[in-house]
Amino acid sequence: METFEEVQSPNHETEELTRMKNKKRLIVDDGDRDGGDHPTALFINIRYAEGIDNPINTTGRHYCVLYWLNPIHEFRTRVVHTLLNPSWNEVDVIPLPIRNHTHDYSGFLNLEILRFGSPTDPGPSSGVSIAGRARVPLPKEPFCEIVGRFGLVRPDAQGHKAEAGHIVLSMELTNRDNPGGMDG
């Protein structure tokens, strides 16, 4: 599990935070990103999140989005520092392996918005809290772009799921060599 130290001030980043900002992927084999002989890919643009924090209790916080199709291979956005509504606007391409003429994925894009470095979070000792989660169905047809605002949830104190804002993204299932209409 990744660990993060508390950020002392906006101008003094910890070594761990700096390392996270420079690291593109948490768990990805080199062969998984180059596409190899995977002709199909998911083009994704993670744009921004809204309503994930209470403005009254918000201080400058650090956020990134962890996302995956298969939990063995997780990807993440860059880390952003903001008071409200973090924005990434990052485009990524995830090659989709095909085994026995079928795609080897669950049919869902799983996302977690991670918040860290906040002295007000009662989260774990690692300093990382999940600000929200979503599970978004992948496009069923190639070259059909999905653009949307998807609801986030997070566990509350009683273990129930509570609404936690929204994430805005677009994605398209397409041929790796012909990305279609995805915008950046």
Image (tube, helix red, strand yellow):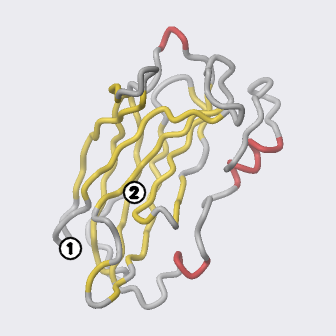
Quick one: SS at disc 1?
Answer: loop
The residue to which callout 1 is attached is 142
Q: Look at 47% across and 82% down and name the residue there.
A: 35
Image position, residue 27 (x, y; %): 60, 64
Q: Look at 30% across and 59% down and name the residue there.
A: 108
Circle nearer the N terminus (2, 1): 1
Judged left or right of residue 42, residue 85 is right
Q: In the rendered view, would you say 45 is above or below 128?
A: below
Judged left or right of residue 116, residue 76 is left
The residue to which callout 2 is attached is 184
Image position, residue 47 (x, y; %): 40, 45
Q: Residue furthest front?
A: 158
Q: Look at 53% across and 75% down and name the residue there.
A: 33
Judged left or right of residue 92, residue 104 is left
Q: In the rendered view, would you say 126 is above or below 25?
A: above
Question: Dividing the picture into quarters, in which one does residue 161 lie?
Answer: top left
Q: What residue type is labelled 2?
A: Gly
- Given residues 37 and 73, the one toward you in this image is 73
Q: Count the marks: how many?
A: 2
**From the viewer's perspective, is the residue at label 2 or at label 1 nearer?**
1
Quick one: SS at disc 2?
Answer: loop
Q: In the rendered view, would you say 20 is above or below 31?
A: above
Q: Which mark is residue 38?
A: none
Judged left or right of residue 79, residue 139 is left
Q: Which quadrant does the C terminus fall into?
A: bottom left
Image position, residue 129 (x, y; %): 57, 33
